[in-house]
Amino acid sequence: MNSLALPGHAGTLAVRHWPNSSARFLVVLSHGYGEHLGRYGPLAEALCAAGAAVVGADHVGHGESEGERVLIEDFEPVVDDVRRVAQWAGTEYPGLPLVLLGHSLGGMIAARYAQRFPEDLTALVLSSPVLGTWQAVDQLEYDEIPDEPIDVSTLSRDPAVGQAYTQDPLVWHGPFKRATLEAIDRCLTTIDFDHPLGDALPCLWVHGDEDELVPIAETRTGMDRIRGLAFTERIYPGGRHELFNETNAEEVRADLIGFLTRLLG
């Protein structure tokens, strides 16, 4: 894995690049709220082994990127940042099919990217995406946003995942910023009332049916509004929020790679 810096809309973006000199396709990763791309090494390595070059940036205010921690006042410029990373990757690997993979809040960002720039993408993968409604936004009803750390057991059935998350200094462990919640709420509404993804963009949605952080029923309300005909869903019984860190992560990765192999050859 290589590290580099690119200019973003609100400062320097910390970019991680898993190179592949014989890549047949390109995957851009969009991580979730409060975390960073350094947690995606095993997934990126599996994708590289399947023929991908993989790249992604820590979003503004996340990980090693610049910006006030977890403060995002508008997600449209964040989508622009992801596109800057994708365009840089396109210069490194010209002519390759581009797959955008977004997890959790990164799935919301990826869905918005697909609405704005469908011509960029060969496929879209949404992992436990925040779409439709999200219970975290309900915290806007409080005068003061509660400082309640997440229950890390909701991340994965593997307790080591929660332990590593708790001890990771690049993960945000404090409360939401009100402006960020308001921006999430606006973005979800924008996605709901903008155009569907259409029938030409293949999309894979993966979700665990025991995801307490982003409940599948909430996501489905948004997914049903934007899905096109070229749509595949895979729901994992017992799966919690971070499917690529779950006890059946090998199965999830195999399903992802199978989807991409059928699509890209």
Image: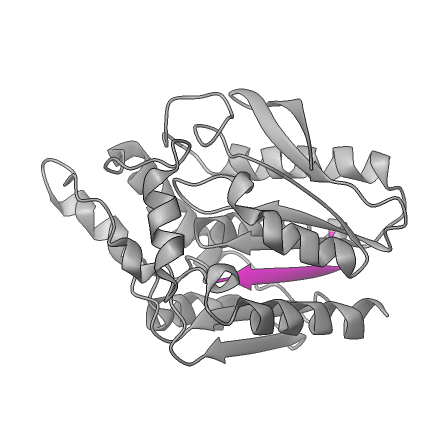
Residue 197 position in % (x across, y down): 61, 63
Way the structure is coloured: one colour
Residue 60 position in % (x across, y down): 48, 29
The C terminus lies in quadrant: bottom right
Furthest-left residue in view?
143
Q: Which residues are magenta?
A: 121-127
In the shown orientation, is residue 77 left or right of residue 139?
Answer: right
Residue 213 in view in this figure: no
Furthest-bottom residue in view?
237
Q: Magenta stretch mostly in which secondary structure?
A: strand
Is residue 45 inside the magenta stretch?
A: no
Residue drawn where x is 72% and y is 74% of the image: 258
Q: Nearer the viewer, residue 126 or 255?
A: 255
How many numbered circles are shown? 0
The N terminus lies in quadrant: top right
Residue 191 position in % (x across, y down): 48, 55
In the shown orientation, is residue 146 left or right of residue 127?
Answer: left
Q: Nearer the viewer, residue 164 or 259?
A: 164
Res 12 quadrant in image: top right
Q: Nearer the viewer, residue 153 or 225?
A: 153
Q: Is residue 10 above or below residue 226?
A: above
Furthest-front residue in view?
160
Q: Nearer the viewer, residue 101 or 44?
A: 44
Residue 45 in view in this figure: yes
Q: Is residue 63 above or below residue 245?
A: above
Res 220 quadrant in image: bottom left
Residue 37 position in % (x across, y down): 55, 41
